[in-house]
Structures are given as C-alpha cells and as structure tokens.
Image: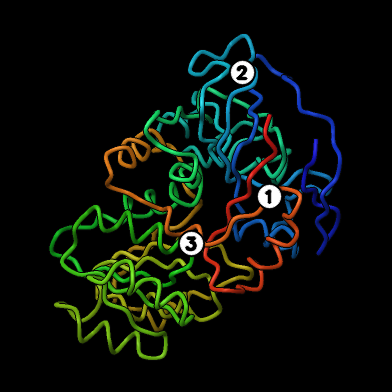
Amino acid sequence: MKALTYIEHGKFALLDKPKPEILDPRDAVVRVTLGSICTSDLHIKHGSVPRAVPGITVGHEMVGVVESVGSAVTAVQPGDRVTVNVETFCGECFFCKHGFVNNCTDPNGGWALGCRIDGGQAEFVRVPYADQGLNKIPDSVTDEQALFVGDVLATGFWAARISEITVDDTVLIIGAGPTGICTLLCVMLRKPKRIIVCEKDPARIAFVREHYPEVLVCEPENCKEFTLANSDHNGADVVLEVAGAKDTFRLAWECARPNAIVTVVALYDEAQALPLPDMYGKNLIFKTGGVDGCDCAEILALIEAGKIDTTPLITHRYRLEDIEEAYHLFENRLDGVIKVAITMPKA
C-alpha cells in the first residue's frame, strides 16, 4: 500500500509499505477512505515532537471501513464505517477510568497513531484497542461530516467541556485555525452571552465573519482593549488559547478577568514563560494538556442531529497520490486553506 512516511527531520515521502495486520486480539485494521492533515503533522516534520519515530506512517485524522478485527474486539465488525480516535487508550487503567484517556498508562497510550506507531495517511491503518479507538458512523452522516471527530473536533469539544462555560460568560478564543474553529463550534453549543475570536490572518477573519456572523472578531494588536470593551467583568470570563504562537500565551492571561479560567488548547513549539509577578492577584485557573478524546460518540450524535457541522472547514481536496502537494498548500497556508481532505484509493 501507499503510505506517507516520516523519513527524517524536515522530510516526509510517499512510500510503498506492507498492509498492516492484526498483532493483538484487541486490534482492528481499518481501510482508510478519507484522511486529513493536522498541524501536529507539521510539528513532527519540523522536529517539534521528539517522541515521533522516523519510519512511521504519519497521520491521525481519518475515517474508514473496518477491514478485520482481532478476536477480543466486540464494539465493531468488518464492514462498519468508523471514525478513528487520535488517542490510543486501554479503557482499564486509573486515568482511562477517570476519563483522562490522553494519560493512558499503556506503552502506546495517548497520541501514538502517526507519531509512535503507523498512522492513517495511508490506504490501511492498524488501530490498537479498537473497542475504545473506533466509533461507528451513523448511516446519515457522511465521511466528510465525520472526518474531524477523532482529533481536531474532539479537541474543541474537550476544551469547551473543561472550561466551565456558563450562559452569562464572555468567552475569548485566540486563534481561528482549524482547531480554533472546532473549538468555536463547541463553545457555541454552550450558548455563552458573547464569543470573541482573536485572529490575525485576513482569510480566517473573513471565514469567521462569513460563517458565524454572531461572533465578535478582533486582531491581536487590539485584543485586550476589544475584550475589555465587550465584557462585563473587566476581561473575558473564559479564555481558550488555541493559536500557540509566541505571544498568544501572554495575550490569553492578559485578556482574562480576575478569577477567570484560561484553557490552553495549543501545542507550542517552545517553552512559554509563566510571569508570576505580573500575574499576581489575578487568581487565574489554568487548564492545560492534550485532548481527552473520549467524547466521540456524543460528538457523532450531535453531528447526526445537525448541531455541529465542520464541512465548511474542508476548503481543498486531494488524492493520496498528491498528498505532498496538499502538504505544501497546508503548510504555507496558500489559497485560503483551512483543512484538506485526502481521498484514498477505492478498495
């Protein structure tokens, strides 16, 4: 099969690889029908994910059809259309039982697919702990509608869930990239009093204004003043930092009101300073960490009910054989790209 492979720092290549096989009774092999490119894939390419293993197939955003299952798998069977969770989790350890599946103690727990074990920018993928890592797609939901459930949409849902948003809140979301938009969609479900999105890219600002006209939009240079002018309590009640840029961490806590919640969704390329003397007296609550992607069944139900629609994010479509061209477009943010859908060869 064809598989996009991490060769070395700065280099991916589309190679021929053996089709994956069942290695454990809890495994499933999924024929990938549609995949996507995540910013985290770019982090691997550029060396920001030291645990990534050269030689692995990259990619962790995908949907497909179950090809085969191990003898211990009970939740899915061959022929089922499924989403694939970005995280590998056993469902049995302390962290899994408490819903913190990103911290699963299994050696391949957490983000493994496309990082430490072969992922899904390929024709087939092996999914460990398939009963936890796969969710059946309702018949009325298309592959494109379900494409982001297992990662970027699960990230937004998790971020909104842990941020304790109320109907009286002003919520500030910093960043309107793919994860920022998915976070916005999930925040909107909680119906806060107002939502502000901070973004610097003109194309992304235009996207938010076109698709979500009820949302307030500002740019980083005037974000603090804009938030103060459009909040009831001297700053945002909840801030979700989704940009991960050099100055956005500081912007997040500066725009938060005293005793606010600041949820850090972004993955940073470098360490961020926590300037405690400057922050003293704000009494902020910080929530950080990787997505706990255990809400996929609920997210699929919301999609089926028409309450979440991420299909506008798919601005470009490519075939697997053209995936390197798709990476060039996505990495350089060309042609107003937000997300790319990668179509796999037909079975």
Q: Which amino acid type is marked by label 2?
A: Arg
Q: Residues within 10 Å of mark 3 (few under 14, many from 20)?
A: many
C-alpha gap between disc 2 and disc 3:
32 Å
Cβ atoms under marks 1 and 3 closer than 8 Å: no
Q: Residue furthest top?
A: 71
For disc 3, the marked residue is 178
Name the quadrant of the N terminus: top right
> Where is residue 57, by image quadrant?
top right
Towards the viewer: 4 or 166: 4
Report the residue marked by disc 1: 319
| Residue at 79 percent of width and 47 percent of height | 53
Give the label, 1 or 3, closer to the camera: 1
Q: Residue at x 43, y 44 (%)?
A: 145
- Mark 1, Cα crowd under 10 Å, few <14 / some 14-19 / many 20+, is some
Colouring chosen for the image of the structure: rainbow
List the residue tagged with mark 2.
Answer: 26
